[in-house]
Image (cartoon, rainbow, N blue to C red):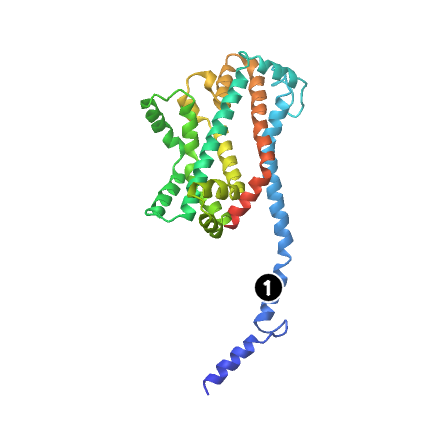
Amino acid sequence: MAVVPVVAGAADRAKPGPAGAGRPGRRSRRSRAGSPMRPAMSVTATALLALGSVYTLLPVLWVLIASTKSSASLFTTSTAVPGGSLVANVKQLNGYRSGLFWRWMANTALYAGGGALLGTLVCGLAGFALAKYRFRGKQLFFNVMLGGVMVPAVVLAIPTYLMLAKLNLAGGYLSVLLPSAAAGLPYGTYLGRIFAASSVPDEILESGRIEGAGEWRLMLRIAMPMMAPGLASMFLFQFVGIWNNFLLPYIMLGDDRKFPLTVGLYSLLNQGTYQPAVYNLVITGALLSVLPLIVLFLTLQRYWRSGIVTGAVK
């Protein structure tokens, strides 16, 4: 007798009732009450994103307008009024110390391109090994590597300089290239593990082993092409980070012909205290230093967006 009411109550709760009675009715009222909120939230999110975009693009717009002004009109005309001296500023920058700016540009491309390629290769292989192989100490190694994400790069700058000075590498190209490649290893290895786990099926690796492929061939010929979107994202992150790096080359380098753009433009800006005429050169150089990043983003946009989606889903 005690079981029948319980079963009946459960059956009554399972029956779909009208909109005004029972639990389904409450759900329908909640969904109807919540539906008008969605457009409002969408408009708010879009407005916040638009505000953030304007905040991000305003400095770029200011640099673009200021680079068109001469040194005489840079501080005397309105900020929103462009000038007509962009070509003259580029020519003047090109002639500064026999084209030293383009030497800085080439140095930055070497540091950022070489460091990002080396770092992406190491992170891709390490992430693949962590995702697809079992070995002793694997989780401990991954936890220690992931803990390196929490260490600021500023803390490691001075110890890195002292270590490279003992190896007689301080002041050379390798003193910036090698630490730049190693700086992105913790986060890059984490991303590499995610991309390898999500984009490289174990069945394909087993098929390759059955066909007689070695482990290096599996990694380089099979896994790496399948991880291409993720590797492109890792390369882009590391390239931008090295391109904008200032503290490490500022500490490591003493020869201005080995400076990257960040340190070179900073040294040029310091000269503006005594020679105000070089301020327009600094602004023009800042504008030209942004162009390679824009080209790289547009070139790798398809791979970068696909890699971000893959990592987010994982």
Side of 303 relative to 165 (left or right): right
Whether residue 284 appears in this view of the structure is yes
> Where 274 sits versus 169, above or below?
above
Q: Which residue is mark 1?
A: 30
Side of 222 relative to 163 (left or right): right
Q: Position of residue 83 (x, y in %)?
A: 67, 20
Q: Position of residue 191 (x, y in %)?
A: 46, 43
Whether residue 244 appears in this view of the structure is no
Residue at position x 46%, y 36% in the image: 121
Q: Check disc 1 and give the amino acid type.
A: Arg
Q: Position of residue 61 (x, y in %)?
A: 62, 29
> Where 263 sits versus 50, above or below?
above
Q: Position of residue 263 (x, y in %)?
A: 47, 22
Residue at position x 54%, y 79% in the image: 11
Q: To which quarter of the image does residue 35 belong?
A: bottom right
Q: Secondary structure at mark 1?
A: helix
